[in-house]
Amino acid sequence: GREDPGRTETDSADESGSILQEFSDDLSGYRRLIPAAAVVILLCAALSLYLRRRFRRRQAERMGCRGIFGRFLEMLRCAGYMSGCTGAEEGFAEALSARLPCLSREEAERLVGIVSRAAYGSGGPREEENEFAREIYFRTEGWIRKELKGLHGLRFKYIGGF
């Protein structure tokens, strides 16, 4: 912590300036690598988002109706449809079919009924009920992807993973 009595502020400023100049000179050979590194980082990020989306899709193909319904509600929230709903509201099936033209009222009521029986009933869902819930999920996902355009569509598809 002792200062050199013969040293002035201009000496230290000149010294730090020369250190920065030396550092800049050392990096001058790498200036062409910076854009290449940025491209590699962007490609890795895009690849990881794509792989995440594929993983989530394969995961959904093996889920039961309760898991699919949870993912269905998450998908609707991410897309901006019915974001305040939990799926347990009175009249949810009617609101769902009114908001999503790709889903009939009967299909929405059947989906809600299957999930309610799976959640609160004594027996588990049958495989055809799980398959019905998956079919509704994937059909609605395709419809939403067609509806959403621009950045919102990209965010839904890659950031949301649908």
Image (cartoon, helix red, strand yellow):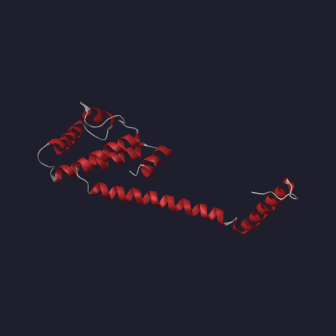
Q: Residue lying at the far front in this picture: please name it.
A: 2
Q: Nearer the viewer, residue 150 or 62?
A: 62
Q: Quadrant of residue 32?
A: bottom right
Expressed as whole percent of the image width and height from the top left, the position of residue 129 reads 18, 49
Q: Relative to residue 14, is residue 39 drawn left or right?
A: left
Expressed as whole percent of the image width and height from the top left, the position of residue 105 reads 24, 36
Expressed as whole percent of the image width and height from the top left, the position of residue 94 reads 26, 32
Expressed as whole percent of the image width and height from the top left, the position of residue 31 reads 70, 64
- Vertically, is 24 above or below 139? below
User: Residue placed at 32% from the left, 47% from the top?
Assistant: 71
Q: Quadrant of residue 20?
A: bottom right
User: Residue placed at 41% from the left, 49% from the top?
Assistant: 160
Q: Quadrant of the N terminus?
A: bottom right
- Vertically, is 152 above or below 23? above
- Vertically, is 155 above or below 45? above
Q: Relative to residue 58, is residue 10 drawn left or right?
A: right
Q: Relative to residue 32, is residue 57 drawn left or right?
A: left
